[in-house]
Amino acid sequence: MAKRAFVDISRSSLLYADTKLDGLDEHLTARMAIPPEPGSVARRIPLMAELRAQALDTALRELRDELELWAPALELVWRTQEIEITEAIHAKRPAACETQGELLSYLLGVAVGACNVLDADVHPSHFVAARDALQQLKEALKEIYTEVCIPY
């Protein structure tokens, strides 16, 4: 099941470069520059560039490293697993999203799904760093989605 989470996150990683997300960081930066309401605390909204460079890359690296680590214990040849994973990633294209909101929703859904797969099907003592990285990715995407797509 961790392999499925890795394939899903890897497949969606191509969408982080979609042109629908162009200008999003400027929008988020402008929103953070607005002073908070009296009595409220200023929020730090993650930027997509940070998300790609940190949370996404960390989640992919941690999942891959854990999969490679567990392969021998499961009597699997890692090189064969890498080939199967690569084929699975390229076998299906990510969903086409018409709007920025749909794209953010899709990316958030993939991150939530990957977290749920690990929580439901992988022992809690395994893939700990990968779970943490996916959780950070999910929370950052949720913050961005909320800021951009849910009007107040």
Image (cartoon, rainbow, N blue to C red):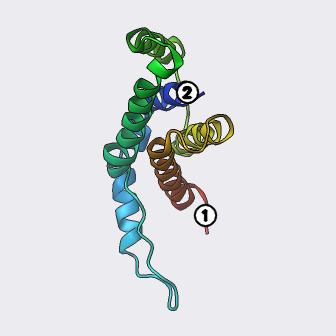
Q: Is residue 145 above or below residue 12?
A: below
Res. 119 in view: yes
Residue denoted by label 1: 151
Q: Residue at x 51, y 59 (%)?
A: 143
Could you tell me which secondary element the residue under label 1 belongs to?
loop
Q: Contact, CB < 8 Å: mark 1 with mark 2?
A: no
> How many residues crowd around disc 1 within 10 Å: few (fewer than 14), some, or many (20 or more)?
few
Badge 1 amino acid: Pro
Residue 24 x %, y %: 39, 51
Residue denoted by label 2: 96
Q: Along the polypeptide, which appears first: circle 1 or circle 2? A: 2
Q: Is residue 140 above or below residue 42?
A: above
Q: Is residue 107 above or below residue 135?
A: above
Res. 95 in view: no
Q: Residue at x 35, y 73 (%)?
A: 33
Q: Of 109 and 123, which appears nearest the observer?
A: 123
Viewport quadrant of the N terminus = top right
Q: Of 29 and 109, which appears nearest the observer?
A: 109
Viewport quadrant of the C terminus = bottom right
